[in-house]
Amino acid sequence: MAILVFIAFLVGVVLPVQAGVNAQLRTGLGHPLLAALASFAVGTVALAVVSLAARARFSGAPISAIPWYQWTGGLLGAFYIAAAVVLAPRLGAATLVATVVAGQMVASLVLDTRGWVGFTQQPLTFSRLCGVILVIAGVLLINRR
């Protein structure tokens, strides 16, 4: 479990770096949508290479049997990347990431409590609610002038 938490921490370390790099790419390419597109293109090529190297094979359900909403992950990722490209230089890394994390925590509580989109249903406890409130308080403190 500790290694999984550490990997999640590393993902958190990478996100603000990604936002900054993509914001700089926006300057180079001249438009936030082109920067998001380029980011996804590079990521797609990287995943294709890793998938080939790992000899990943499709063995799941027929494509027609997969519910439509399960295909929206890429769309949601594109929204995040495009928004981060626009917001990162305006908000700064700390405000952007703290606010994104607060949004993630609120949504995560709802998803866990309801057991939506494949998450195991978990009760809304006082400590979980306090944790989200503290994250939101952190956003307010980071933005305090």
Image: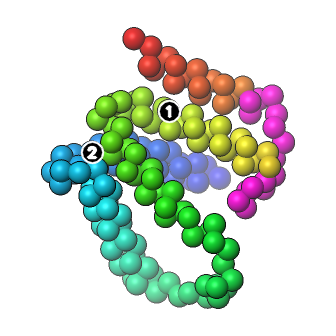
Q: What residue is rendered at 42% in x and 29% in y? A: 95
Q: Is residue 23 left or right of residue 79?
A: left
Residue 18, labelled with which disc? none
Residue 84 image offset from top left, x and y in percent: 38, 44
Q: At numbered mark 1, what does the secondary structure look like: helix, strand or loop?
A: helix
Q: Which residue is mark 2?
A: 23
| Vertical order, 133 against 29 (above or below) | above
Alpha carbon distance from label 2 to label 1: 17 Å
Tell which of 33 and 102 is nearer to you. 33
Which stretch did the figure color magenta? 115-129
Total of numbered circles in the picture?
2
Quadrant in the rendering for residue 64 = bottom right
Q: Earlier in the sequence, mark 2 or mark 1?
A: 2
Q: What residue is rendered at 51% in x and 24% in y? A: 139
Amino acid identity at mark 2: Ala
Residue 101 image offset from top left, x and y in percent: 53, 37
Is 117 one of the magenta-colored residues?
A: yes
Quadrant in the rendering for residue 50 = bottom left
* Res. 21 visible in picture: no
Q: Is residue 95 left or right of residue 28?
A: right
Amino acid identity at mark 1: Thr
Residue 26 image offset from top left, x and y in percent: 23, 49
Residue 99, labelled with which disc? 1
Q: Is residue 130 left or right of residue 31?
A: right
Residue 87 image offset from top left, x and y in percent: 36, 38
Q: Is residue 123 left or right of residue 85?
A: right
